[in-house]
Image (cartoon, rainbow, N blue to C red):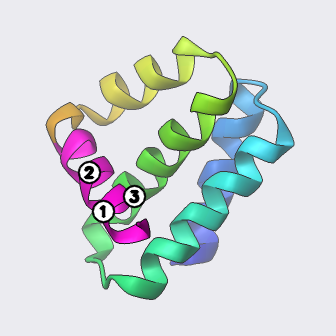
């Protein structure tokens, strides 16, 4: 399942022409969260979307946030999982 998620993250990185470092950081955040917190398969893409949102804060791109929130239609869950992720990562 992680490989499918990483492939999706690569597609997002290519579509929005994000820096490679943003992709690497998103994957690292995803891995660190999964080490500490078990997650349901249905929420795995949401975790990846949250990781991209957090990682993309290092570069200014509003398109990524809009795409992820509108295409996934999970803005409430993204905020909730962002809070969970940040609390878990310290």
The location of residue 16, given as percent across then percent down, is 69, 24
**Residue at disc 2, secondary structure:** helix
Residue 39 pos. (x, y %): 29, 78
- Between disc 1 and disc 3, the foreground one is 1
Q: Residue at x 77, y 34 (%)?
A: 14
- Return the residue found at the far front: 90
Say which element carries label 1. helix
Question: Measured from the top left, where is residue 69 in percent x and y?
Answer: 33, 28
Q: Is residue 50 above or below residue 56?
A: below
Residue placed at 37% from the left, 56% from the top? 86
Q: Which callout, 1 or 3, points at the residue further toward the start of the chain?
A: 3
Q: Which mark is residue 87?
A: 1
Residue topped by disc 3: 47
- Image position of 12 (left or right of 35): right
SS at mark 3 in the image? helix
The residue carrying mark 2 is 83
Residue 40 quadrant: bottom left
């Amino acid at each position: 399942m992680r490989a499918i998620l990483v492939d999706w993250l690569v597609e997002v990185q290519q579509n929005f022409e994000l820096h490679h470092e943003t992709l690497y950081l998103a994957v690292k955040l995803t891995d660190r969260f999964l080490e500490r917190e078990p997650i349901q398969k249905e929420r795995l893409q949401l975790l990846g979307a949250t990781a991209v949102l957090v990682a993309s804060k290092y570069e200014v791109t509003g398109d990524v946030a809009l795409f992820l929130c509108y295409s996934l239609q999970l803005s409430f869950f993204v905020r909730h999982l962002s809070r969970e992720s940040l609390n878990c990562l310290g």
